[in-house]
Image: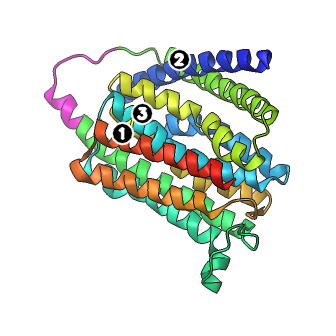
Amino acid sequence: MTVPILLIIAALILVAGGAHFLVEGSSRIASKFGISDMVIGMTIVAIGTSMPELVTSILGALKGSAGIAVGNVVGSNICNILLIVGLSALIYPLSVSKENINRDMQFVLLSTIVLLVIAFDSQIDSLTIDDNMASNFISRSDGIILILFFIIFMFYSVISAKRKEGNENRANTESSEEPKKKVNIPLALLMVAGGLGALIWGGQLLVDNAIIVAKHYGVSDVVIGSTIVAIGTSLPELAASVVAAIRKKVGMALGNIVGSNIFNVFLILGGSAVITPLQLESINHIHFVFLLLATLLLLLAARTSMKIRRIEGFLLLAFYALYITVNLSVK
């Protein structure tokens, strides 16, 4: 077990370094083009940090392992909200605008509800809850619907945000006499690409070796998929959001999570289902319940004071500890 543990340490170093360069490069691009940290977080950073989930879920779908494909997305989204937002808020309170709540976070709630409806469609028809969900699956048509939701989200959020920011930047340019800071765009793009590469490679290295260690100690596939794999594939989001919070880029820290959760359900799970229908017999309904509760907690925390404070961050982390405890007990 010495080699896997050493590789896990090396992977953590790669992830930390990659997160630093990703956030720094993204910040430079944002300042150059007048794009807010929130939009950069929901697009460049969110798409990049979601690559491990994309690779893991699609490979799981190709190998016929729906448990990995679906469990990875559900577990990662829970981890993103409870663990990553919680840690980021403990480091620095995350301010939230009304627009973020009314548009961006509503899409997170919508993605969760759509996933629940698709996952429990057989139970909804029969008005029963079956713990192993053996009769449920995410079909190719469901996958197409999820991808269409993703297209709508991207079109609506990015276009409307760009229009609003364009007007603000025009007004700021007219009223400001200070020269803009020069930004080396090729270098910034290289930092983003290099940071993403290190994040993805380090995340995969960590997941692979964590699974080796877990299997050595007899941990089941379901628990591995919803905890180790989910946390491992969320490491890029964790690193990027924590580094952004340390640098007080709160928009990027929160936007990364909002965008990643939407991408995970609409694009990654949708794409996996288009490749092959995903049977849900190995997924206990408790994971979906925790996902819904986590999403509602995030919305409640944001609406309470237009800021996710340290106390809310602590509560999110406590709820994640509860999820892990329940997950280990239900198998």
Q: Which mark is residue 313?
A: 1
How dense is the environment of label 3, judged by Cα within 10 Å: few (below 14), some, or many (20 and up)?
many
Residue labelled with disc 3:
87
Q: Earlier in the sequence, mark 2 or mark 1?
A: 2
Regarding residue 190, the answer to whether it shows in the image is: no
Crowd class of label 2 (few under 14; some 14 to 19; many from 20; radius 10 Å): few
Return the disc, 1 or 3, that comes first in the chain's sequence: 3
| Location of the N terminus (image quadrant) | top right
**Residue range highlighted in magenta:** 170-181
Q: Are marks 1 and 3 in contact (CB under 8 Å)?
A: yes
Left or right placement of residue 95 versus residue 13 in this view: left
Name which residue lies at 29% across and 34% down: 93
Question: Closer to us: mark 2 or mark 1?
Answer: 1
Q: CA distance from mark 3 to mark 2?
A: 32 Å
Q: Residues within 10 Å of mark 1 (few under 14, many from 20)?
A: many
Closer to the camera in the image, 253 or 221? 221
Identify which amino acid the numbered label 3 is placed on. Answer: Leu
Q: Position of residue 18 (x, y in %)?
A: 57, 20
Would residue 237 be seen by someone viewing this image from the given angle?
yes
Left or right of residue 260, residue 305 in this image? left
- Residues at discs 2 and 1 in contact (Cβ within 8 Å): no
The residue at which mark 2 appears reads as: 186
Q: Residue at x 44, y 24 (%)?
A: 243
In the image, residue 179 lies in the stretch drawn in magenta:
yes
Question: Label 1's element?
Answer: helix
Q: Residue 274: give x, y in percent of width and height.
A: 74, 60
Is 151 positioned to the left or the right of 68 in the image? left
Task: Tell me the SS state at disc 3.
Answer: helix
Q: CA distance from mark 1 to mark 3?
A: 6 Å
